[in-house]
Amino acid sequence: MPQLNTKPAIFLVLLLILAALALATSASASRAARRLLPAGGGEGVVDYVLTPEAEKRAQVIETHLDPGGYADKELYTRGGDLLVCVVQSGTLEMRIEDERILLHAGDAITLDPKVPHTWSNPSRRNRTKVFWVDVPAEY
């Protein structure tokens, strides 16, 4: 079952997740070096990996969605244990199985990536920017 949080303080949760991972056996840094991910099955989506390539415990991805952009028209699943989504700007529609959830700037949701889902920018005029945390790293 997805968990929704509409408080902007969710960024603290992201920082705590990353800090806890950094307290493990080693640390790595990424100095404003973004890796562009190859285009997936969607349309109007640009993804950047923000965490260092060597980091496999978790991964932060910044996604830019054009108006009407989407990950996939059909529901899909991914590997991993946890997916955290934080909407930085704009609006994001999450489809998780039969449920549709509209998220706005500052909203966050967590879900099991093995549950069928997809997402899109329902706006016809405004871009959307989203941060994802994958545990463990997938790309």
Image (cartoon, rainbow, N blue to C red):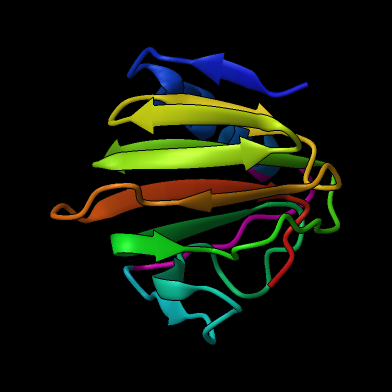
Residue 90 shown left or right of residue 136 in the figure: left
Residue 82: percent from left, percent from top: 76, 39
Q: Is residue 120 above or below residue 81?
A: below
Q: Please, what is the dominant secondary structure of the magenta stretch?
A: loop
Residue 73 shown left or right of residue 64 in the figure: right
Residue 28 shown left or right of residue 15 in the figure: right
Q: Is residue 7 above or below residue 116?
A: above
Question: At x 16% / y 52%, what residue is drawn?
Answer: 126
Question: At x 79% / y 47%, what residue is drawn?
Answer: 116
Residue 51: percent from left, percent from top: 53, 62
Quadrant including the N terminus:
top right
Residue 29 part of the magenta-drawn span: yes
Q: Quadrant of residue 19?
A: top right
Residue 11 part of the magenta-drawn span: no
Q: Is residue 115 above or below residue 48?
A: above
Q: Quadrant of residue 17?
A: top right
Q: Is residue 99 above or below residue 76?
A: above
Question: At x 80% / y 58%, what residue is drawn?
Answer: 78
Question: At x 52% / y 23%, what residue is drawn?
Answer: 13
> Seen from this angle, which residue lies furthest left?
125
Magenta-colored span: 22-31
Residue 104: percent from left, percent from top: 32, 29
